[in-house]
Image: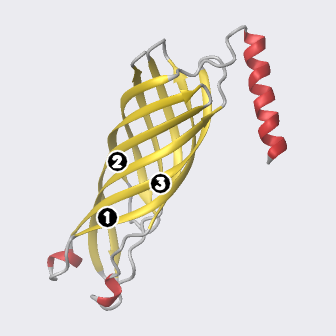
Amino acid sequence: MKKMTVSLMAIAIGLAAISGAPAFAAPVGIGLGAHAGYGESKDADSGSMLAGAHIVLNVLPFLGVVGMVDYKFEEDHSEAGQDYTVKSYPLTAMGRFYIPIASFSPYVAAGVQYRLINYGGDLFDDTELDDSDSSFGWLVGAGAEFDLNENFAFFGEVRYEASDPDRDVENAIEDAKDFKYDQWSVRGGITFFLN
C-alpha cells in the first residue's frame, strides 16, 4: 500500500511537471456548493435520488474537510410480507486527501455520518410504532475534483456508507428484522470557492 501511494504521488507530480502546470492546483480556501446523486441501501427493493448542500475547507492543496447535508428521497423496502418506505437526512463530516494534478485532483475520502430517518408504509401505518429513528455510521469513498476556473470546481465521487439505526423492530413485530442501511452512493456537484 505504501509503495502504491508513493508511486501515485510520483506519477501525479511527474504529469504536472510535464504539463507545465503548477503541481499543486487544488484550490485552498472555503467553498460552498450543491450536489445531487443516487444511492441504494443494501436491503432496499430500489434505490433513490439524493440532493444536498456542502461546505468545503481545503486547508492545504492535498487536504480538505467537507461538511454535507442531504435529503435522500423515498426508498422502498419489504420485510416479512410488509412494505415500508424510508426517507433520510444524512449529515456528513469527512476528510478528503487529494493528489493535485494541475486542474484535476483525484482524492480518497473518509468520515462519519449522522442520519435522521423517517419510516412509512404498511409496516408503520398499522402499528403504534414511532416512525422516526437516527443512526451514526462511517463512510469511505473516492472521487475527483475538476477546477473549472479560479472560483468554481466540479466534483464527482462514489462512496460506501455504513449505518445501523437504533431501532430494533424485532422486539415489536414478529419476523421483522433489525433495520440496517449500509449503502453505496454516487454524487456530483459544483463548489464556489470564496477566494
Report x, y in % for residue 175.
35, 89
Can residue 162 be seen here? The reply is yes
**Residue type, label 1:** Asp
How many numbered marks have been drawn onto this rendered protein structure? 3
Report x, y in % for residue 28.
52, 22
Alpha-carbon span between mark 1 and mark 3:
25 Å
Q: Is residue 123 left or right of residue 21?
A: left
**From the viewer's perspective, is the residue at label 1 or at label 3 nearer?**
3
Between 87 and 10, the one nearer to me in the picture: 10
User: Mark 2 vs mark 3: which is more N-terminal?
Assistant: 2
**Residue type, label 2:** Met
User: Mark 1 vs mark 3: which is more N-terminal?
Assistant: 1
- The correct choice, above or below, for 172 with respect to 113 in the image is below
Residue that carries the numbered disc 1 in the rendered image: 76
- The correct choice, above or below, for 90 with respect to 119 in the image is above
- How many residues crowd around disc 3 within 10 Å: few (fewer than 14), some, or many (20 or more)? some
**Residue type, label 3:** Val
Residue that carries the numbered disc 3 in the rendered image: 112
Alpha-carbon span between mark 2 and mark 3:
21 Å
Q: Looking at this view, name the residue that lies furthest to the top.
A: 20
